[in-house]
């Protein structure tokens, strides 16, 4: 699958925060892009940047056998074998936390295949083992109970809602120590550039505040502080 995100902007997204990206998207009128209530499995896991590959669940129904088609792999199993390298598997469980959506073995499969991360609005089992993988994984909370009788995976790579955030295949999903944000793929390069520039300005502002400067007139930026920032950036580029 091809990507609309340039390699240089992918690298820039790896150095900016979910908070900064969400602010940039808010300025563009996008207010529902942070996946609410989702946190990293481990405080020490790597940052996450990748295109969305989606998996949708519905409630289990007693007359449907979730293992049907097991010879060629269930929809659930296929998602972990078909998510492309560099992509993030994003799961829509409707917020189900009475049964897990997967455990450490399936997530280990994503890591082995070079995927960029995994996100669910439900929960994983085997979270101590998942934490030890050193792989970006985000959930609502740990769910040790099995999914049997609760969830049935039905579709791969379709538009989904993850904790009430719309996620379309190919959208750019970024995760850090605070949570996860979804960038519409058509805006990804522009938002990456804006967020990177905002991060540079924030570094400048932090240095000024550490020197004792007032916040007023500095943050949010003014025309005068922007001019100061440009001079600061030129001086730092020259070092």
Image (cartoon, helix red, strand yellow):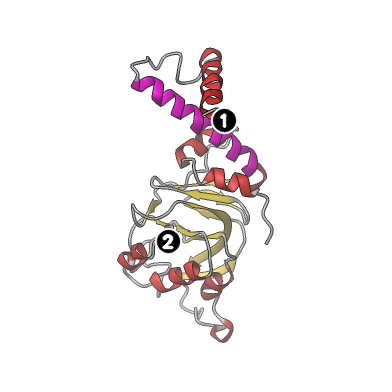
Residue 23 in view, yes or no = yes
Residue at the limit of the structure toward the front, as seen here:
239
Give me the residue at 45% from left, 51% from top. Answer: 47
Image quadrant in which the N terminus is located: bottom right
Query: Which residue is denoted by mark 1 in the rendering?
Result: 27
* Residue 3 location (% of width, % of height): 67, 54
215 shown above or below 185: above
Give me the residue at 57% from left, 56% from top. Answer: 52
| Badge 2 density bin: few <14, some 14–19, many ≥20, Cα 10 Å | many
Callout 1: SS? helix
The quadrant where residue 56 appears: bottom right
48 shown above or below 150: above
In the image, is 212 to the left or to the right of 135? left
* Residue 148 location (% of width, % of height): 40, 75
169 shown above or below 35: below
Question: Per the image, is 195 magenta?
Answer: yes
Residue 184 in view, yes or no = no
134 shown above or below 36: below
* Residue 115 location (% of width, % of height): 53, 63
Magenta range is 188-210
Query: Which residue is denoted by mark 2 in the rendering?
Result: 135
Give me the residue at 51% from left, 78% from top. Answer: 64
Alpha carbon distance from label 1 to label 2: 31 Å
Question: Per the image, is 61 magenta?
Answer: no
Callout 2: SS? loop
Quick one: 220 or 16, which is closer to the camera? 16
Quick one: 211 or 164, which is closer to the camera? 211
Q: Earlier in the sequence, mark 1 or mark 2?
A: 1
In the image, is 236 to the left or to the right of 214? right
Q: Main secondary structure of the magenta part?
A: helix
Quick one: 218 or 172, which is closer to the camera? 218
């Amino acid at each position: 699958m091809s990507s609309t995100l340039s390699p240089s902007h992918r690298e820039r997204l790896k150095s900016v925060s979910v908070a900064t990206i969400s602010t940039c998207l808010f300025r563009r009128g996008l207010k529902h892009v942070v996946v609410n209530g989702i946190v990293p499995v481990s405080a020490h896991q790597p940052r996450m940047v990748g295109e969305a590959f989606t998996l949708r669940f519905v409630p289990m129904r007693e007359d449907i056998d979730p293992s049907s088609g097991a010879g060629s792999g269930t929809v659930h199993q296929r998602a972990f074998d078909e998510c492309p390298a560099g992509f993030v598997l994003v799961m829509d469980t409707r917020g189900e936390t009475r049964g897990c959506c997967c455990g450490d073995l399936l997530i280990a499969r994503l890591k082995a295949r070079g995927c960029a991360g995994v996100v669910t609005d439900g929960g994983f089992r085997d979270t101590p083992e998942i934490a030890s993988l050193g792989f970006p994984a985000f959930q609502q909370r740990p769910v040790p109970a099995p999914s049997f009788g609760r969830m049935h995976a039905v579709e791969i790579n379709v538009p989904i809602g993850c904790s009430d955030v719309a996620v379309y295949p190919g959208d750019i999903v970024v995760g850090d120590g605070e949570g996860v944000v979804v960038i519409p793929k058509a805006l990804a390069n522009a938002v990456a550039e804006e967020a990177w520039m905002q991060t540079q300005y924030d570094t400048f502002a932090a240095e000024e505040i550490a020197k004792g400067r007032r916040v007023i007139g500095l943050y949010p930026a003014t025309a005068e502080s922007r001019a100061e920032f440009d001079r600061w950036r030129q001086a730092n580029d020259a070092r």
